[in-house]
Amino acid sequence: MHTVNQDVLDIIVKNADQGRANRKIPAENIQALKDCGFFGILLPKSLGGSEHTPQEFFQDHLAIAKADMSPAWACGIVTNSPAIFARNLGATLLGVENSDFFI
């Protein structure tokens, strides 16, 4: 994996039932994905991202999906669409108040 590590996946697995029960991705998951750099995996380095290839993104994205599909679905939208979605819309989709979680 390129940005997502086993610690992040363990957090996602641990919080899967909570996310389903609350119908919201747990803040701990979002913070872990932000901390590891996943939200900036496709962004150019000039914009603060890590500029990985689409193939590298999909390897990490698949690992998230294997841990819990719900955050993977949301991450796919947010991570693939930084030029389309405004930061505030992405924040709304993930249920966080601070829209600076992308990178």
Image (cartoon, grey):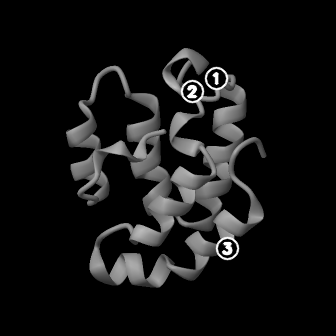
Q: Residue visible at 65% across and 49% down?
A: 62
Q: Position of residue 57 (x, y in %)?
A: 64, 35
- Asked if the residue under mark 3 is in contact with the one under mark 2, i.e. CB atoms within 8 Å, the reply is no
How crowded pointer 1 is (Cα within 10 Å; few <14, some 14-19, many 20+) is rated as some
Task: Kindly identify which residue carries mark 3.
Answer: 10
Give the vertical position of 17 relative to 89 (above or below): below
Give the vertical position of 14 relative to 31 (above or below): below
Dot 2 or dot 3, earlier in sequence: 3
User: What numbered label is drawn on residue 42?
Assistant: 2
Task: Kindly identify which residue carries mark 1.
Answer: 51
Q: Is residue 58 left or right of residue 92?
A: right
Under mark 2, the amino acid is: Leu
Secondary structure under the numbered disc 1 in the rendered image: loop
Q: Spatial distance from mark 2 to mark 1, Cα to Cα?
A: 5 Å
- In this view, the residue in front, 29 or 60, is 29
Q: Position of residue 83 (x, y in %)?
A: 34, 20
Q: Residue visible at 68% across and 26% down?
A: 52
Under mark 3, the amino acid is: Asp
Q: Is residue 76 left or right of residue 57?
A: left
Q: Spatial distance from mark 2 to mark 3, Cα to Cα?
A: 23 Å
User: What numbered label is drawn on residue 2?
Assistant: none
How crowded pointer 3 is (Cα within 10 Å; few <14, some 14-19, many 20+) is rated as some
Q: Is residue 87 left or right of residue 74?
A: left
Q: Quadrant of residue 7?
A: bottom right
- Asked if the residue under mark 1 is in contact with the one under mark 2, i.e. CB atoms within 8 Å, the reply is yes
